[in-house]
């Protein structure tokens, strides 16, 4: 039973992305925000892509948030997101400057903590 679950876990990402390991766009980092356009029909979208569009209808979500909601690896999520941006279902925007500052502040605190532990 456990072996089957592990085999499915290995095959599933390959199936979800159509065998691709890299996104068509290299514009996504963990805090890139995405919003659904709502302009295009959703017929033909995979269940994962449909879920992403639904998640992004309520407002902008970051790549890492979408990945968490889907319980998929970030790399795989980026492949799906790039497909949806290419098809016009999603648009991207950079995070607000305040979000970048807080991220830098957090990284600085981690660095300070590591230095203090030496």
Image (spheres, helix red, strand yellow):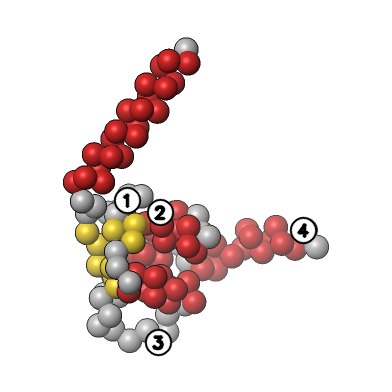
Front tag of 1 and 4? 1
Q: Secondary structure at mark 1?
A: loop
State which tag comes first along the sequence, 2 or 3: 3
Whether residue 87 is visible to the viewer of this picture, yes or no, is no
Which residue is under mark 2?
64
Residue 43, numbered circle: 3
The residue that mark 4 highlights is 3
- The answer to which image quadrant residue 24 occupies is bottom left
Badge 3 crowding class, 10 Å Cα cut-off, few under 14, some 14 to 19, many 20 or more, is few
Residue reaching furthest to the top: 118
* Disc 4 to disc 3: CB gap under 8 Å: no
Q: Secondary structure at mark 2?
A: helix
Q: Residue at x 45, y 58 (%)?
A: 67
Closer to the N terminus: mark 3 or mark 1?
1
Earlier in the chain: of badge 2 and badge 1, it is 1
Label 1: which residue? 31
* CA distance separating discs 3 and 1: 28 Å
């Amino acid at each position: 039973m456990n072996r089957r679950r592990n085999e499915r876990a290995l095959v599933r990402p390959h199936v979800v992305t159509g065998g691709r390991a890299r996104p068509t766009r290299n514009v996504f980092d963990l805090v890139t925000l995405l919003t659904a356009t709502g302009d295009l029909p959703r017929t033909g979208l995979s269940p994962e892509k449909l879920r992403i569009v639904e998640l992004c209808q309520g407002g902008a979500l970051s790549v890492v948030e979408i990945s968490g909601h889907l319980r998929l690896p970030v790399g795989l999520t980026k492949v799906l997101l790039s497909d949806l941006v290419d098809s016009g279902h999603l648009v991207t925007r950079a995070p607000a400057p305040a979000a970048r500052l807080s991220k830098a502040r957090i990284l600085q605190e981690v660095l300070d903590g590591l230095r203090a532990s030496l």
